[in-house]
Image (spheres, rainbow, N blue to C red):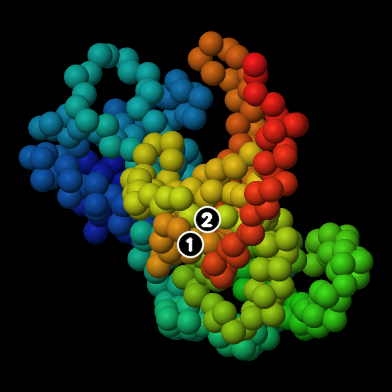
Amino acid sequence: MSQKEEFINCISSMNTKSLETVLVKNAFKRYANVSFLEKLNKLFTELKASGNTSLELYKTIGVCGCNKDKKIFCFVGNYTQDYFAITYQEDENNYYNFSTSCSEILYDNKHQLGKFHYFSIKPESTSEYRKHLNDSNPICEYNTFSSKSVCKMKTIVLWLEKYRGFYDDVVTILEDKRYVSKLNSIEVLVKKDFEVLYGKLDILSRLYKKEAYFRQQLDNYNGVKDSVLKLENWFSYQAENKNEYQLFSSVFYDSRELTHYRLELDELTLNPEDFKYTLKYMSIIEEAKAIHFEGKIKSIDDLEVYKKTENTRAYTRRKIVLSIDDFCCSEFQVVFTDGRVKHLDNLSVGQFVKVFARLTGGELQNSEGTKGYKHHLYGWRVEILDAKPKVKKNTKEMDLYYKYILPLPF
């Protein structure tokens, strides 16, 4: 029996053990054969559980964009007619270069087929991939320190220094297309995983090194914050050098958090102490974007909890209404969401407070097509103030106003 005939016989009888000696190296999409056999075993188990004892082979060609004109093996269960399909190439002795095929296949005769099983390998679920990760010292060390409740940046910096040379080698390999073509798909994936992991941790290291810069900026701020002109110049300098903090904001900004930042990246939870100057600096920058006003709390709504939908994320919301002692006796509704609802804890109606909020707005169009503008106040934080001082009334002068400036209408 030739190797080609033996391959067909092994698949038809759902026997992967004998198949090991028949397959060419990396037979399926440059995956190691162990991963290909694992996938076949899983599929054979499902087909056998449905009552199938053997598979019937149909050789055909694909008609879809993903498999058009490619040679295809279609294997059909003898009981349920459930089936799967893979593309292939062949020479005189072997079938090779197997790949995934969809169900769009040209048949000489009409077949009554059952359920289609899409044949694809998920690298992360293969034992080969797990073995590579378990054998990788840098990955194992990363898993150890990332599993801790809080990870210190010094640990990450030491890891980066230790594997700098290995990272350079991996990058060189991945850039060499001829060398990469000799590796199987899992080996390439593991190297790319390491490259990405190193790159992410290197970004954290770069942000950590900026602590000295932000500490200096805070010292400068404390030296000018009591001078309107000097403080304005300080903020102008920060705007011109926005690139110094833009990366930190991009990586960690989270509007749902009470502090506006979540120091987490993948499995890592970072120590806020490692970024204490950066966080303090960012709070000044963020607060400068907020407007603030003083008023008396007129009402505080109960907490509202919204579940995740197809179009929105899960979130919590709480509204507060402030009475403002201005010419129009304005009343402002401010919405606090997610982590920032904690700012409203222990507040009560009648308290005098200063509210910091973000003003947002934009053009809207109603169902009739009329365009308009709508604005919202999103709460940033709340500062409790002393009771508002009572204003002495000058009734004599106001009596003159009502008598001569604002006369009766008759």
Quick check: 27 left or right of 51? right
Q: Residue at x 32, y 15 (%)?
A: 108
Residue position marked by numbered label 1 in the rendering: 351
Q: Is residue 43 above or below residue 176?
A: above
Q: Residue at x 24, y 59 (%)?
A: 17
Task: Tell me where residue 224 appears, x and y as whole percent.
Answer: 86, 76
Outermost residue toward the top in this view: 368
Q: Is residue 356 visible?
A: no
Q: How many other residues sit within 10 Å of disc 2, few (<14), some (14-19) or many (≥20)?
A: many
Q: Residue at x 69, y 80 (%)?
A: 277
Outermost residue toward the left in this view: 51
Task: Tell me where residue 41 appears, x and y as whole percent.
Answer: 24, 53
Q: Amino acid at mark 1?
A: Gln
Q: Is residue 280 above or below residue 182?
A: below
Q: For residue 290, which quarter of the picture?
A: bottom right
Residue position marked by numbered label 2 in the rendering: 296
Q: Residue at x 80, y 80 (%)?
A: 222
Q: What is the C-alpha distance between the residues marked 2 and 1?
A: 6 Å
Disc sitting over residue 109 in the figure: none
Q: Amino acid at mark 2?
A: Lys
Mark 1 secondary-structure assignment: loop
Decide which of 317, 36 is in the foreground and name it.
317
Mark 2 secondary-structure assignment: strand
Q: How many other residues sit within 10 Å of disc 1, few (<14), some (14-19) or many (≥20)?
A: some
Quadrant of the frame with the C terminus: top right
Q: For residue 252, which quarter of the picture?
A: bottom right
Decide which of 376, 176 is in the foreground and name it.
376
Quick check: 38 left or right of 81? right
Task: Tell me where residue 242 appears, x and y as whole percent.
Answer: 81, 61
